[in-house]
Amino acid sequence: MKRGVLIVLSGPSGVGKGTVRKALFEEPDIDFTYSISMTTRKPRDGEVHGEDYFFVSRDEFEANIKANNMLEYAEYVGNYYGTPKSFIDETLASGHDVFLEIDVQGALQVKEKMPEGAYIFLTPPDLKALKERLQGRGTDAPEVIERRVAAASSEIRMMANYDYAVVNDEVETAVDRIKNIVQVERLRVNHILPEYIAMIEEFEK
Amino acid sequence: MKRGVLIVLSGPSGVGKGTVRKALFEEPDIDFTYSISMTTRKPRDGEVHGEDYFFVSRDEFEANIKANNMLEYAEYVGNYYGTPKSFIDETLASGHDVFLEIDVQGALQVKEKMPEGAYIFLTPPDLKALKERLQGRGTDAPEVIERRVAAASSEIRMMANYDYAVVNDEVETAVDRIKNIVQVERLRVNHILPEYIAMIEEFEK
């Protein structure tokens, strides 16, 4: 059984991660398993355990933290939210690709624990276009424009921590690029070699 | 100017590197620059300097070795053959992709000096298929078959030194995979980041 590929899509807030993810999951030839988060908040009407979230008690969540099973986690408004490693591990081992959409902070934590994934940084189109768009609108003062461009600069520098950078100029193009990345990740030697070694050992018995 | 991608195609002898390379260069949407070797042998009729080879004197070749300009070289029948770094560097800097087809020995030497390339190991189809094909022919003794399978095993283990493994089951499939790899290499952060950093610095002036 060939292991699945872990795909981590991240990027600055507002870059359009959710839109790209939705378009990606609508592709007919894509069969990613979405990484399910664990939380201590109560399920809302219609939410299903093991589908929307893994709904657990505070004790259970903290036991997962202690057992080093949380790839990343954070606390918001008194509830824990995080990414359990075991679910991702099992899904990958069963040969399915896992897709994780996550903010930059979380992605870097996940990367420390699972460096073998494909870490994709969704980046805003270039600064020139951004600045021109802001100037073209004619609604922002020059110093506001400068501040927004500076913020975009510092966000873009974060891409250094990723494997791939995909410009989100057009959703369809971004989706195609991500699909290509996943195909090519399957050709990476660290992905293929275990299978070949197993095959060789089978023959050398 | 975005730097080109260095594509190094290698693999065990007899795996079909030349066939794949030819098919790749016939693709209409491919515009790779073939890495030109340097040699001290005399040009044959019709061979052109800077096209078939860089034809140089022994002194000049040795000066290149001393100047650390040979990514790899070897001596055959009294003549030097090798891969000059400067040509590859200049071509990449001009934004063109460079394609280098080379044996495993040479590829590993090149990788030490230019680790940023995409190192592709063309691998024979799986050992089971190989063994079955050999058995099916019915011409080889079992110990000959075992020896050939063992040789294929040790060749396949060499893939650990590469970035990608492409199975050469069908030439067209192998070509498509290599084209995909090159597209995705252009999305790698270490390829894109310098351009973005330059853009940011331009804005921060």
Image (spheres, coloured by chain):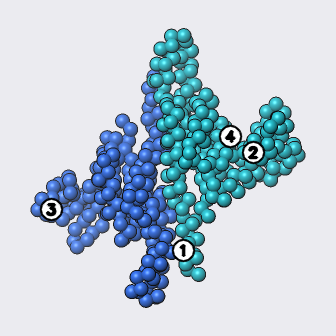
Chain colours: A cyan, B blue
Residue furthest out toward the front? A28
Q: Which is nearer the eye, B8 or B200? A: B8
Residue contact at pointers 2 and 1, CB within 8 angstroms: no
Callout in the foreground (1, 3): 1
Dot 2: what SS? loop
Disc 4 marks which residue? A106
Residue displayed at 88% across by 46% down: A59
Gap in Å between the C-alphas at discs 4 and 1?
38 Å
**Secondary structure under the numbered disc 1 in the rendered image:** helix
Q: Nearer the viewer, residue B19 or A145?
A: B19
Q: Secondary structure at mark 4?
A: helix
Quickly name the residue at label 3.
Answer: B43
Assess whether mark 4 and mark 2 are in contact (beta carbons under 8 angstroms): no
The disc at residue B76 is none
Question: In the rendered view, does B9 fall on the left or right side of A47?
Answer: left
Q: Which numbered circle lies on residue A200?
A: 1
**Residue lying at 71% horizontally and 47% vertically, measured from the top left:** A71
Pinpoint the chain carrying mark 4: A
Residue B59: image location, x then y, percent: 20, 60
Mark 2–mark 4 distance (CA, rounded to whole Å): 21 Å
Q: Residue at x 45, y 24 (%)?
A: A128
Kindly identify which numbered label has been placed on residue A51.
2
Confirm whether circles 3 and 4 share one chain.
no
Q: Which residue is found at the position 11% from the left and 62% from the top? A: B45
Q: What is the three-letter code of the residue carrying label 4?
A: Gly
Q: Nearer the viewer, mark 2 or mark 1?
A: 2
Instruction: Quote the CA–CA distance across marks 2 and 3.
Output: 69 Å
Residues at marks 4 and 1 touching, judged by CB atoms closer than 8 Å: no
Is residue B93 something one can see in this rendering? no
Query: Chain ID for label 3?
Result: B
Query: Label 1 to label 3, Cα distance in Å?
Result: 44 Å
